[in-house]
Amino acid sequence: MKFLLFTFVGVVHLFSLNSGKAIYKNDISQRTFQEVKEEIAHYGDVAKAIINLAVYGIARNRSYERLALLVDTVGPRPSGSKSLEKAIQIMYQNLQEDGLENVHLEPVKIPHWERGEESAVMLEPRIHKIAILGLGSSIGTPPEGITAEVLVVTSFEELQRRAPEARGKIVVYNQPYVNYSKTVQYRVQGAVEAAKVGALASLIRSVASFSIYSPHTGIQEYQDGVPKIPTACITVEDAEMMSRMASRGNRIVIQLKMGAKNYPDVDSFNTVAEIIGSKYPEQVVLVSGHLDSWDVGQGAMDDGGGAFISWEALSLIKDLGLRPKRTLRLVLWTAEEQGGIGGFQYYQLHKANISNYSLVMESDQGTFLPSGLQFTGSEKARAIMEEVMSLLQPVNITQVFRAGEGTDINFWIQAGVPGASLLDDLYKYFSFHHSHGDTMTVMDPKQMNVAAAVWAVVSYVIADMEEMLPRS
Amino acid sequence: MKFLLFTFVGVVHLFSLNSGKAIYKNDISQRTFQEVKEEIAHYGDVAKAIINLAVYGIARNRSYERLALLVDTVGPRPSGSKSLEKAIQIMYQNLQEDGLENVHLEPVKIPHWERGEESAVMLEPRIHKIAILGLGSSIGTPPEGITAEVLVVTSFEELQRRAPEARGKIVVYNQPYVNYSKTVQYRVQGAVEAAKVGALASLIRSVASFSIYSPHTGIQEYQDGVPKIPTACITVEDAEMMSRMASRGNRIVIQLKMGAKNYPDVDSFNTVAEIIGSKYPEQVVLVSGHLDSWDVGQGAMDDGGGAFISWEALSLIKDLGLRPKRTLRLVLWTAEEQGGIGGFQYYQLHKANISNYSLVMESDQGTFLPSGLQFTGSEKARAIMEEVMSLLQPVNITQVFRAGEGTDINFWIQAGVPGASLLDDLYKYFSFHHSHGDTMTVMDPKQMNVAAAVWAVVSYVIADMEEMLPRS
C-alpha cells in the first residue's frame, strides 16, 4: 500500500447491531432486517464449505504456493518494470488456466522510475556507510553526488523554526513513528518542505514500526513551483544516531549519490477475471489487491498476499461449483504504489456503472491473521456485514471495524459505494513494508488460508444476496 | 558474544534453596547458612542505595549515555581495527577520569581480518542481488569471483547424503533456527564440511531468531587438512527462497565475490580498572564485558551494553563511597569475537592466582531487562547467590538460573571458579546479533539502569562478604 488514512482503525463498531437494525427497519426497504438476517443465516453451510476447502481441504496453502511461485520467479514488480509486465502476463495465463471467466487486461499508462545506483557515506564526524533507498519519483544527484553538512530535525515545525540553518544543507528528518498515516507525511512531503527552505537534499527516517537497520522506500511527491531535490529514506538507526550526534554539537557531513531517474510512462494493465453472475450479471462485487510492488524484496506482503487471496476467493467459489447472482470481479491493480494509477484508470472507465457496484473490496494491509473486516458504508449495510461476518465464526474472525479502504477502491468509496478491507497486525506489516524484508518469509500459508476464507465468504454472500448492499 | 553453550538456559534452579541450605550446613564451614543469610540481609540498605542511584538517581541513564557517546564516536570495533584500539584508548582515559584505581592495559596479540568489498548476485533463475556478510577469518575469492551452481541443503546430514552433488558447487545451508548454540555450528563449520565434499564456497543462512533481510556475520573456523573455501552468511529470506527454487527443480547459479583477507596479528589490550579491596585486596571479584565487536552496526548490544554496565557497576559503588573487602576488578576484553583471545590471554597471565578469585562475571547476552542471574558453581555457592539476588527484590529480578557463562570467563569457570552472567531476552538478542542492526536503537536507557543495578549489587556484595564463595 502507498499511503492511506487509518483514522478509524481500531474503533470497534461504535454503533451496535441493534442501532443498525433500527435504522434498517425504518428504511423504505420492503424486507425487514429479520428477513435479511434469515437470508444470511442460510449461507451457513456455504460458508462452512468455503472455510473447509480453504483451511483444511485440497485448496489448503494454495494461495501461498501460488504466490511463492510468482514472486520467486519474477521478483519485485515496480511500476514501469519488465518484471511487473511479466507478472501481469503470467497472471493473465494463470487466471485463464484456473477456469475463471472474462479474463482480460485493461490498459493503463503508468510511471516508470528507476533508482539506479545509489549510496550515502557519512564523512564527518566519522566515516560510515549509510544504508539508503531512494524514494519513488525522486530525481538523482549529479554524478559526483551532493556533499553537504546535515541539519537534523524531528518535525516540520522544527524545520520551520530553523529554516535559516537549512540553506545549502542536507535535511535529515528524525521524526518519531506515531502511526503510518501520520508519519508518512515526512516521506511524501519531506523533500518539498526541505527544498522550500533551501536544502540541497533530504533524507527521511524510514516510516517503520520496527527496524533491523532496514530502509523503507515509498512514493514522494514534488510540488509545482518548488525546486526538485533528491530524497531518500535512511534507517531509523542512522536517523537516531545523527540526531544524537547533532545534539552533541558534532558537525555531520554526508556525501549522497543517487542515480534515480524518471522515464516516460509505459503501457501496463489492470488484470481482470470474473465469475459472471447468474441473475444480475451486470451487478458487481469487486475483490482486489495490487500486483505491482516496490523494487526491493519480493512484494510478497505488499501486496502479493492481497492479490493472491483475492484470486483465491474466486478459485474457492469456482471449485465449490458456486455461482453467485451478481458478478464477482477480481481486479489485480497496476501501479498502486504510485498513487493508485491503475485504480484511478479503472474508476474512470467504469464509474458510469457505479450504481451496479454492491461492494468494493481491497486487501492491502497484510494477509496474516485478520482481526476482522474494515467496512465503510451505511449503518444498514454495516448491520448486514455484521451478519455476514458472523458466518466466519468457525475461524473466529467476526468483527466489523470502521474505515474500510484501499488506495484503489477509495475512488468508489468516496463516491458512496460500500467498501471493505482486512484489518491485520499493522505493527508487523509496517516492520516489513516497502523494505528488502518484504519476502515470502513474512507470509504464513495457514494465515493466508484463513484470510482467503474470510475474503471468499464475504464476497460470495454479498454477491449472492437477493438485494445489493444499501447505500447511505 | 561469539558462540556459547546455552544447554541449561531456562532450567530454573533445579535444586531448591532448602537443598542448598542442607549442603551448606553439612559443610566444614564454621558458619551456619543462617549466619551467612543474616550477613547478606545486612546488605539490604546498600542494595537499595545502589538501585536508587542507578535507576532513579543522578546515575540514571549514565551507562546508556556513555555507551552512545563511545559507539557513535568510534563505530564498530572489530579485532585488529584502528577503531577498536581507539575505543581502548578512550576507555583507558574514561576509567581514569572516573576515578577508578589501578587503571591499566594488559597486552594481547589479536587477529586482524578484514572483509573488504564483497557481493553476491544470483544469475539464475533470475538476477537478484543477494545481501551477504563474509564470515570472520574467511578467505576471499579470486578477483573475478566464483561463479557456480548452487546445492541447497538443510543440514549436515543432507550434505553427507548428497555429497556427490556438491563437487564444484556453492553449498547453501538453509538450516532452521533451533537455538543459537545448536544452529551456530553451521556458521562455524559450514565451510569445512562443504570443502570436505568438494564445494567451492559456502553460504550460510544467518543464525538469527528474526530477520528483516538482515545478514548476521560471526566467526568461522577452518580445519587443518581441509581446503579453505570462501564463506559468507546470507539472509534467512534468501536461504528460504533458494530452498523453494531448488525444490521446484530450478537451476540456481550465483556469482560470489569476496575481498576478505587475513592480516598478521596486531597488538591490542584488555582494559582493566579496579576498586581495590579494603581487607583482602589480593582477592578478586571480576566483572566484565568485551569491547570489541563485529565490523557492522555499532556493537552497541554485543557487547557495548555488557562492557558499559560492568563499568557502571564500579562507578555506582565508587559514587556511593563504598569499598568492598575484596578487590572489584573491571575487565573490558579484547577480541572476544575471535574466540575469547583477550580472555584466554588474561587467564594465562593470572591463573596462578586462581584461588583468590571469588566470582567471575561477564555480561554478553544483552542488557535489556534481565530475567535473572545465570550462575555456575557449587550448590552452597548457589544458595548464597539466591540470597544475594533476593536483595534485588526492589527491581523484581531475583531469579538464579543455571549455566553462568561467557566466552572470556569460561576458562575460569571450567577451572572451578564460580561464574555469573545475565539471562536476557535471547529472541531479541539474536534478532540483532552480529548484524547491521546492532546499534544504540536496540538499547534502552531504563533497561540498562536496571541491568547495571543487578550487576553492581551482585558484584559488590560478593566482594564484600566475609568469606569467598565456596567452590565444589
Image (tube, coloured by chain):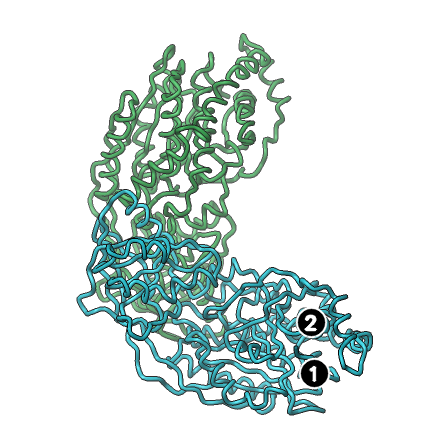
Chain colours: A cyan, B green
Q: Nearer the viewer, residue B24 or A216?
A: A216
B122 displayed left or right of B184 = left
Residue positioned most to the left? A144
Q: Which label number is shown at residue A223?
A: none
Report which residue position mark 2 lands on: A379
Tally of numbered tags: 2
Q: CA distance from mark 2 to mark 1?
A: 14 Å
Quarter of the rendering occupied by the C terminus of chain A: bottom right
Q: Label 1 sits on what residue type? A: Met
Residue under the image location 43 percent in, 41 percent down: B444
Q: Label 2 sits on what residue type? A: Glu
Report which residue position mark 1 lands on: A468
Give percent across and percent down for residue A150. Answer: 25, 55
Specify the subunit that label 2 lies on: A
- Seen in the picture, residue B417 relative to A182 is either above or below; the reply is above
Secondary structure beneath label 1: loop
Q: Are marks 2 and 1 on the same chain?
A: yes
Give percent across and percent down for residue B177. Answer: 50, 53
Residue B223 seen anywhere in this rendered image of the structure: no
Give percent across and percent down for residue A443. Answer: 53, 65
Which circle's residue, 2 or 1, is located before the other in the chain?
Answer: 2
Residue under the image location 55 percent in, 9 percent down: B31
The quarter of the displayed image where residue B111 is located: top left
Q: Nearer the viewer, residue A279 or A309?
A: A279
Question: Which callout, 2 or 1, points to the residue nearer the camera?
Answer: 2
